[in-house]
Image (cartoon, rainbow, N blue to C red):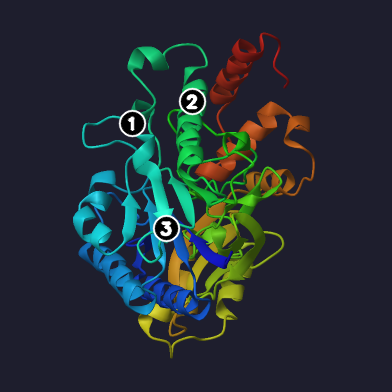
Amino acid sequence: MALRRILHTADWHLGQSFHGYERAWEHDQFLAWLLAAIGEYEVDALFVAGDVFDTVNPSSVAQRQWFTFLAELVRVRPQCDVVAIGGNHDSAARLEAPEALTRALGLHVLGSARNAAGEFDPGRLLVPLGGRNESEPWGYVAAIPFLRADDLGTLTELMAEDAPLRLMRARFAEIFAALDERADGGKARFALAHGVMLGASRSMDSEREVRIGNVEALPVDVFPETLAYVGLGHLHRPQQVGGREGVAYAGSPLPLHTSEADYPHRVVMVEVDGGVRQRVISMPLPRWVRVHRIPSEGRLGSADEAVAEVGALPSHAGLPASERPYLEVRYRADAPRPTFVEEVNTALDGKGYRLTTVRAVLPEAASRDAAFHGTSRNLRELDAVDVFRAHYLRRFRNGEPSEALVSAFRSLLVDVDGGEAES
C-alpha cells in the first residue's frame, strides 16, 4: 500500500465582493498558493466541497479563475484527481456544462445528484480516485452536491410526518450502500457534502440559513464510521463535527464578512494508507488582505473614541488598491452623530484603507449584546425571550424589538411548548 495525500478545501466564493469591493486579486493569491501546495506535497486528490462561485451567475472573471486553476493543476500535477461538488451558491447546470471537457481532463465536477433523465442516481456520485493514472482506483469518493427538497421525493412524500430527515437518511444510505459495493478490496472511502451539520458553529452574519433537502441540520451519523474522511462545505469556520476527527469543515479560504476576521482560515490535508486514515493536518492560509475592526477588541467605544482609534491607524497608502486593508467601524451611539461618517473619512484620508461598514449601536443594544455574547452558559440555560432579543439586536442593529413583536414571540413559545412562556 502507498501513502496518499488529499487536500480538502471549500467555499471559495469566486466573484464575491467584500462589502462592495471586488477581490479577484485575493482569490488569485489563494489559487496560486493552493497550486504550489499541491505540487510541493505531491497531493493525490483535491476535494472542493461546494460554493466554488459566490452566485449562480458568476462573472467572466470568476469563471476564468476557475478554469485557469483547473488547467494549471493538470499541468502542475497531472496525476492529482479533482473532485468538486456544487454548493447552495452554485448553479448545478453551470458547473456541469463543460462536463465533456472536464471529464476528458480527468476532473470530476458534480453539480447535481440527478442523471440526464432527472432521476436521483447514487451511482453517478461515486468518483474513482487514481483510475486514469493507475491500473485500478485506489479509492472512491461519494461526492454529494447540495441536496434540495425535490432530490428527496415527491411533494406528497415530503408532506408526511418527519419526512425530510427520514428521506434524507434514506438517500445517504443509498449512496453509501452503492459506495460499499464499488469500493471493495480495502480501497479508501471518502465523502464530500455541502450543508449544515448538527452541533456545528455558524457565522450568522454571512452564511445563508439553508436547509439540506428541507432539513435544517443533519446528524453526523449519516456518515458511516468506515469512511476514511468526510470533507464538508458551507460553514466558513474551520471545525470538526460530532467529535469525529475525520468529519470536518475546511472553512472558507478568505473571510467573507468582517465578522469572520479572526477565523483561522485553512485547508485540510488528509493522509491515508491502505484505506485507513493516518493523519488530518490543518494547513493555515496566509491572510493576503487584512480585515481591521474598530474597536479591535474589548468594549464598544463612544463616537469620539472610535474616531480617535481610526486616526491612530498606521498608514497603508503605499499598497496597491487591491491589497489595502478593509476596515469596519462600530461605535456606541450615545447621542445622534450625523457627521460621524464624514469624521471617519477625514481621519482615514491618505491612510490607504477600504471602509466597509460604519455601524452605530444603541447603548442598550451594546450592553445587551455584550452580556449575551460574553456568557459561557449553555444555550439551554438561557431565557428564550432574552435569546430572541439578543438575536434581533445582532441581526438588525436598530434598537430593541417592539413590545408587540416580543409579545408575538411569547405567544409562539406558548404554541410550541404548550405552556407559559418565560418573561
Q: Do the residues labelled 2 and 1 touch (CB within 8 Å)?
A: no
- Please provide percent x and percent y for residue 315: 51, 86
Disc 3 is placed on an element classified as loop
Q: Marks 1 and 3: which is nearer the front?
A: 3
> Is 320 situated left or right of 292 in this image?
left
Residue at mark 2 to residue at mark 1: CA–CA distance: 12 Å
Residue underneath mark 3: 136
Q: Which residue is drawn at 44% across and 79% down?
A: 324
- Please provide percent x and percent y for residue 234: 48, 48
Q: Quick one: label 2 or label 1, which is nearer the N terminus?
A: 1
> Is 209 situated left or right of 220 in this image?
left
Residue underneath mark 1: 120
User: What amino acid is labelled 3 in the image?
Assistant: Glu
Q: Do the residues labelled 2 and 3 touch (CB within 8 Å)?
A: no
Q: Badge 3: few (under 14), some or many (20 or more) residues near its Cα, within 10 Å?
A: few
Disc 2 is placed on an element classified as helix
Q: Quick one: label 1 or label 3, which is nearer the N terminus?
A: 1
Q: Badge 2: few (under 14), some or many (20 or more) residues near its Cα, within 10 Å?
A: some
Q: Which residue is drawn at 20% across and 55% down?
A: 100
Does residue 215 appear in the picture of this structure?
A: no
